[in-house]
Structure formats: C-alpha cells, structure tokens
Amino acid sequence: MKKLADYTIPFVGLKLGKHQYEYGINKEFFEHFEYDEFNDANVKIDLLFEKKTTMMELTFRATGTVNVNCDLTNEPYDQPIDSELFLVVKFGEEFNDDNEDLLILPHGEYEINVQQYIYELIVLSVPLKRVHPGVEDGSLESEVLDKLEELSTEHNENEDEIDPRWDKLKNLLND
C-alpha cells in the first residue's frame, strides 16, 4: 500500500520533547485502505509525539463520528468514536511490528508513517454489533423493525401449541 505523505513524520530534525500533530480523517482516508464499511467519517486525531534520546512515544486520541449502517435495520446513523492508542517506538536491527504497543525501526530510519495506526485505532473503536440508538430507545420508525416485531409475535403465539411428538418423547423419560 502506498504511504500517504501527510501522515509521515520526519523525526530526525525534531528536538527532544513533546510535539503535537492533528489530523482530520474523512471517508477518502478509508478509501485509500479500500475499507467501505463507513458511509462517512468525521474524526479528529490528536497525536502527541514525544521524542526521547533512545525512543519515541506516540499517543493517539481519536474523537468524532463515523456513519455506519445498523446491523438490525440497515438504517445509517453516526457512531461516536472516542479512543486512544499508545505506541512506543524503539530502534533495533530490523523492522518489527509484531507487538501492537511496540514498534521497532531499523537504525538509520529517519521518519515514521502513522497512517496504519490511525486506521486501526478508528476501525477497532467501532463496536462489532452496530445498533442504531433509535432501536435501543424505541424511537426509530422502520419497516424492517415493524416486520421483525410482526414475525416475533407470530412466533410467540405458536409457542403455546405443543407438538404432540414432544409428548411422546416425554413419555420415554417417565418409563
């Protein structure tokens, strides 16, 4: 995947200490990753980049919303995003990103690209089951919800009738 230049931080020329970066993330960012689960995105990333003598510490904070479809009704809604990621960057013999909290860059590296970490932070902060807030509080009017309600009441009415075959099986337990 091609690295986006806006998310590359050249750390060689930076002084020791803390540095602030801000990124505005929208739908085009996710299109770069070929991720189409979001209808739209409006997320602000605050990155605190702390350069130390032997390592760097990056603290990402994501706040905003992503527009997704509800898993029950397929109605679009804005899912709030509010999460953090802490990453330690050290230097070693070769590149290693096996640990999610630690990145090892080879000696002589002079920049770091943070686009993958931003992408993962936002995608992983969306719940696995996406439920429209209107479904939870009962205020959403939807044909899908009406149909689900109709089918569930039909099923409940049929539960009162017991299949006679079950009675025969129950008799086996009593024998």
Image: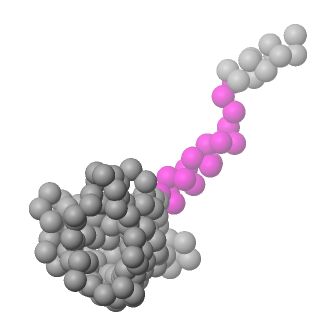
Q: Does the magenta run of residues contain 162?
A: yes
The boundaries of the magenta stretch are 147-164
> Which residue does the image show at 87% across and 10% down from the upper left?
175
Relative to 72, is 43 on the left or the right? left
- Which residue is at a point 37% across and 80% down the rendered structure image? 51
- Quadrant containing the N terminus is bottom left
70, 162: nearer the viewer: 70
Q: Position of residue 33 (x, y in %)?
A: 20, 61
Residue 18 percent across, percent down from the top left: 39, 88
Above or below: residue 162 compared with residue 44 = above
- Prevailing SS of the magenta stretch: helix
84 or 15, nearer to the observer = 15
In this rendering, position of residue 154 left or right of residue 2: right
In the figure, residue 46 lies in which quadrant?
bottom left
What residue is rendered at 46% in x and 71% in y?
86
Using the rendered image of the protein, determine whether residue 79 is visible from the camera's viewpoint.
no
Image quadrant assignment for residue 29: bottom left
**Is 2 included in the stretch rendered in magenta?**
no
Q: How is the image coloured?
A: one colour
The quarter holding residue 7 reads: bottom left
